């Protein structure tokens, strides 16, 4: 079937159609660069990395823009605390952000505009709104958007202004309780820019409208961000942009990812339970976080815990297990890092079996499984980027590959299956060779040799009839999610 995408605006899935044939314009709200990015940010950017990768895999040419908010109350406050300029603060944390994205192997956006660098575009759109009498200047020199001038206000979030809480309360010179700031008049100690209505700096919401229009045009295909941005940020973006251009819709598809929860609570700095991306990656492999994100549909919230990450790490090892060569294959005993990384779904002490000829029935089953995996993966991703089903298809495919390995399927079809597995996993951004961005101390890809050691010690204990010791080793392996089959050719272990 054709790709179908859910939009928060329409509240339904529809066949994906672009403004320009074969080209997709994507704007994703970026971070405010006043502190290190956390795993909640990582979830959002992994989601949109997956969206972009699948669109490019499907043959689209993607134009991806993601902003930095470098002029904001938070950056101004941090700069004042440290006695440095806001630009020094912004540059520091923007560099940290790029390091984090590189470690996560997230494809870089084509443009990373900043508020400070796109000020002419921001002033231009505010000027247009004032000219249209949909924005007004207060006696203090602030500029507010007149929400009543936009009849469709609330169409994204579903909010009714009659019952909604006022925005930016406590401002006596606003005309309407729900009006929001486009421009804030100059204050001592704050960076300012000259504008036709007076010196100051932009409000939060106008920056994304201006940057998206400047770099992608008045109408775009996809606008993305976390679900916490639906109101007021994205609602206000719609009102500003569609009012300025006199056209609708601003974005044809509004994609919002669910938020990361920490042991059941939304992650926020006020709760004191933020985990920075860097801190996470110092302990875990990047692809484990990617698999954690893909385990839930992107629109749903996801709970971060030691257990959920451990489960993702086991799942990653299972995927890499499908990349082990056929028994007796040329690369089986090469000692390469890719072999070590993938040697986890099944391993046997006796690797001398002949994989040269193979069984015709087993080969046919593997060929069918390869075709089925590709079809199922595509169908799941075509259903609003359904990563849980796509990953499940990969897991089932790994099961078939491991079965074929044991049945001695010939190298040709077996290697073709492994290639398909690597390609499909690559569409989701996984590195099945074991180089997935882990820290030196992180990542379970190095686990296989240690499991081998425990299994060999258990074999030794059994040979010496040390049954109690053998049972203890078996139980310890079981706690790690490893099951053992005792065969005449040696012990075989599998990761559950």
Image (tube, helix red, strand yellow):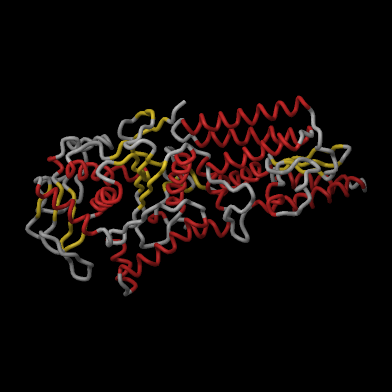
| Residue 328 location (% of width, % of height) | 81, 43
Q: Position of residue 400 (x, y in %)?
A: 69, 32
Q: Quadrant of the C terminus?
A: top right
478, above or below 368, in the image: below
Measured as percent of width and height from the top left, residue 281 is found at: 54, 57
Identify the residue shown where x is 89% and y is 47%. 466
Q: Quadrant of residue 467?
A: top right
Tally the numbered discs.
0
Work out whether 43 lies above or below 14.
Answer: below
Residue located farthest toward the bottom when viewing the structure as drawn: 83
Instruction: Answer above or below: position of 465 versus 84.
Output: above
The percent position of residue 390, horizontal first and vertical second, equals 54, 34
Left or right of 166? Residue 269 is: right
Furthest residue in direction front, as rendered: 21
Q: Nearer the viewer, residue 449 or 421?
A: 421
Residue at image coords 55%, 32%: 377
Picture quadrant where residue 355 is located:
top right
Give the side of residue 174 with respect to residue 116, left or right.
left
- Of residues 365 and 230, the one nearer the viewer is 365
Q: Residue furthest right?
A: 464
Report whether 417 appears left or right of 98. Answer: right
């Amino acid at each position: 079937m054709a790709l179908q995408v859910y939009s928060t605006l329409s509240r339904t899935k529809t066949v994906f159609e672009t403004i320009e044939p074969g080209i997709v314009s994507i704007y994703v709200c970026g971070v405010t660069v006043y502190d290190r990015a956390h795993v909640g940010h990582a979830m959002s950017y992994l989601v949109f990395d997956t969206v972009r990768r699948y669109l490019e895999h499907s043959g689209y040419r993607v134009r991806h823009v993601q902003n930095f908010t470098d002029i904001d109350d938070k950056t101004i406050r941090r700069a004042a605390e440290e006695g440095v300029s806001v630009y020094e603060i912004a540059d520091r944390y923007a560099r940290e952000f790029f390091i984090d994205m590189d470690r996560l192997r997230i494809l870089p956006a084509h443009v990373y505009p900043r508020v400070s660098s796109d000020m002419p575009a921001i002033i231009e759109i505010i000027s247009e709104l004032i000219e249209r009498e949909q924005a007004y200047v207060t006696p203090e020199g602030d500029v507010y958007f007149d929400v009543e001038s936009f009849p469709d206000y609330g169409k994204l979030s579903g909010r009714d202004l009659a019952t909604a809480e006022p925005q930016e309360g406590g401002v006596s010179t606003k005309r309407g309780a729900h009006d929001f700031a486009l421009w804030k008049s100059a204050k001592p100690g704050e960076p300012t820019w000259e504008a036709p209505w007076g010196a100051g700096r932009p409000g939060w919401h106008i920056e994304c409208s201006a940057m998206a229009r400047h770099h992608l045009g008045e109408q775009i295909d996809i606008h993305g961000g976390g679900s916490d941005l639906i109101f007021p940020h994205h609602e206000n973006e719609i009102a500003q942009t569609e009012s300025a251009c006199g056209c609708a819709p601003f974005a044809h598809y509004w994609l919002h990812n669910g938020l990361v929860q920490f042991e059941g609570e939304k992650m926020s700095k006020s709760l004191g339970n933020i985990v920075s991306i860097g801190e996470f990656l110092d302990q875990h492999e990047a692809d484990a976080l990617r698999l954690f994100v893909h385990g839930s549909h992107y629109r749903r919230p996801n709970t971060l815990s030691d257990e959920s990450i451990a489960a993702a790490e086991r799942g990653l090892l299972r995927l890499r297990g499908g990349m082990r060569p056929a028994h007796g294959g040329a690369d089986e005993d090469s000692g390469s890092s890719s072999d070590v990384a993938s040697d986890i779904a099944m391993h046997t002490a006796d690797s001398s079996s002949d994989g040269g000829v193979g069984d015709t029935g087993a080969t046919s089953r593997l060929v069918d499984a390869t075709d089925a995996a590709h079809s199922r993966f595509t169908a799941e991703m075509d259903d609003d980027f359904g990563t849980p089903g796509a990953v499940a298809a990969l897991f089932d495919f790994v099961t078939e590959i491991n079965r074929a390995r044991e049945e001695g399927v010939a190298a040709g079809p077996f290697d073709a299956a492994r290639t398909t597995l690597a390609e499909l996993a690559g569409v989701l951004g996984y590195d099945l060779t074991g180089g997935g961005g882990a820290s030196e101390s992180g990542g379970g890809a190095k686990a296989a040799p240690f499991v081998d050691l425990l299994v060999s010690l258990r074999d030794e204990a059994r040979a010496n009839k040390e049954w109690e010791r053998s049972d203890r080793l078996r139980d310890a392996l079981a706690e790690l999610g490893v099951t053992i089959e005792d065969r005449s050719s040696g012990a075989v272990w599998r990761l559950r």
